[in-house]
């Protein structure tokens, strides 16, 4: 009897195990797909794509500022303790890469490409301000005694645009268009400056002129912005997508609820598919294993889908740090640990890690 009882117990255990395996099959299938699609770490921790100029790519990693011609890379400025580069801007007119470190001095530094030297004297000094942030487009956002303004990186005396005096508020984030952060601010390449008092937000839209978003947005923490076909699209950190043609409009149209969460400065690239008259917004949710999420807007309404193949094949298990638009729909996409890819929305293709082109 004892032997029969043991055999019966083993049989029941096996049956339960098979049932559990069956129930989990669908869940694990997604994990196996992510493992098979994910690119292995390549030893490069990207922070920013600075510029692509005449076949030379300038980029920032966790150990410094580099350039590459596609076959070999050269480190221009090494990160050092207390002098870790936070952001950089390429000024083609003066052949310099401008950068800001974490030394908290308010000073802006430069690397001269003509002489291949790290210049010893700061190119500008913003130490009179409490808050100083060099943006990838060459502007510097400053704050002192609750007054915020934008300056050109090389002139700490002449205000480009005053954002205004906002007592009790500090800078939360600056949003720029994915793929176009390095470009000059214009009507089609705006930026959004978000201030917070710790609970509410005030958002300032700048495209050459400044407009504050309506107070109806004071509860929204925006994670990303896109501008396409005269419309501004704003995505909140909890995944709600809004649109407006006028920044100061009293209400924004809610376009879509993604039911996903997004980090600050999340990747959201706007692309117009003219062949099918569809506006596409390509986003990367916060989850490291989340696939790219494509929102499609046309005359019939809004649809959305996960993109885990084609142009999104290698990006479902990667953290996107920056992107660079080579041409409409053709992007370089730099990730934190998985390398850099080149994706093409029109052909629905992606290169493998570090196999991008610089033409």
Image (spheres, helix red, strand yellow):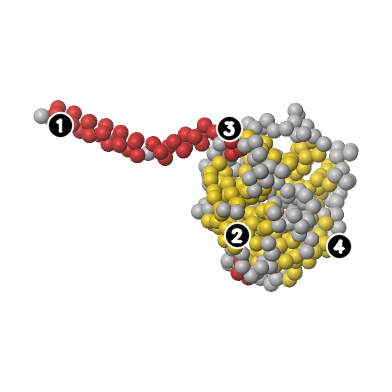
On screen, residue 149 above or below 329: below
Q: Nearer the viewer, mark 4 or mark 3?
A: 3
Mark 2: secondary structure: strand
| Percent coordinates x, y for residue 103 in the rendering | 74, 52
The residue labelled by disc 2 is: 242
The residue labelled by disc 1 is: 5
| Percent coordinates x, y for residue 47 in the rendering | 68, 44
Q: Gap between marks 1 and 3, in whole Å?
A: 49 Å
| Percent coordinates x, y for residue 287 in the rendering | 53, 46
For the point 74% across and 61% down, the residue is 206
Q: Earlier in the sequence, mark 1 or mark 4?
A: 1
From the viewer's side, name the closer residue of 123 and 328.
Answer: 328
Q: Gap between marks 4 and 3, in whole Å?
A: 47 Å
Q: Gap between marks 3 and 2, in whole Å?
A: 35 Å
Q: Earlier in the sequence, mark 2 or mark 1?
A: 1
| Percent coordinates x, y for residue 275 in the rendering | 66, 43
On screen, residue 169 above or below 180: below
Mark 2 neighbour density, 10 Å: few (under 14) some (14–19) many (20 or more): some
Q: Earlier in the sequence, mark 1 or mark 3?
A: 1
From the viewer's side, name the closer residue of 120 and 283.
Answer: 283
Q: Tell me, yes or no, if residue 66 can be seen here.
A: yes
Q: Earlier in the sequence, mark 3 or mark 2?
A: 3
For the point 52% across and 31% down, the residue is 36
53 sits left or right of 311 in the view: right
The residue labelled by disc 4 is: 157
The residue labelled by disc 3 is: 40
For the point 73% across and 48% down, the residue is 180
């Amino acid at each position: 009897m004892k032997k029969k009882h043991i055999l019966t117990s083993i049989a029941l255990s096996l049956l339960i195990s098979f049932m559990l395996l069956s129930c989990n099959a669908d869940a694990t299938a997604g994990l196996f797909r992510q493992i098979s699609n994910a690119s292995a770490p390549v030893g490069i921790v990207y922070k920013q794509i600075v510029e692509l100029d005449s076949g030379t790519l300038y980029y920032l990693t966790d150990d410094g500022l580099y350039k590459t011609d596609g076959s070999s890379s050269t480190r221009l400025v090494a990160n050092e303790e207390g002098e870790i580069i936070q952001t950089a801007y390429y000024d083609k007119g003066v052949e310099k890469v401008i950068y800001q470190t974490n030394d908290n001095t308010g000073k802006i530094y430069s690397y001269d490409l003509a002489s291949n030297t790290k210049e010893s004297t700061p190119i500008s000094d913003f130490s009179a301000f409490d808050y100083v942030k060099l943006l990838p487009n060459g502007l510097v956002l400053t704050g002192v005694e609750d007054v915020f303004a934008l300056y050109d990186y090389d002139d700490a005396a002449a205000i480009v645009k005053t954002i205004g005096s906002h007592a009790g508020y500090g800078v939360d984030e600056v949003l720029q268009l994915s793929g176009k952060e390095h470009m000059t601010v214009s009507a089609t390449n705006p930026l959004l400056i978000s201030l917070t008092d710790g609970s509410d937000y005030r958002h300032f839209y700048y495209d050459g002129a400044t407009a504050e978003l309506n107070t109806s947005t004071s509860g929204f923490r925006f994670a990303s912005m896109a501008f396409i076909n005269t419309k501004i699209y704003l995505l909140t950190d909890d995944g709600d997508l809004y649109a407006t043609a006028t920044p100061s409009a009293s209400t924004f149209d809610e376009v879509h609820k993604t039911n996903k969460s997004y980090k600050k400065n999340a990747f959201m690239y706007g692309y117009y598919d003219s062949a099918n008259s569809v506006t596409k917004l390509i986003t990367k949710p916060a989850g490291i294993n989340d696939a790219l999420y494509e929102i499609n807007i046309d005359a019939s309404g809004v649809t959305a889908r996960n993109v885990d193949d084609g142009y999104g094949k290698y990006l479902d298990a990667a953290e996107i740090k920056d992107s660079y638009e080579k041409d409409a729909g053709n992007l370089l996409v730099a990730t934190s640990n998985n390398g850099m890819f080149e994706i093409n929305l029109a052909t629905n293709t992606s290169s493998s890690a570090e196999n991008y082109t610089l033409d």
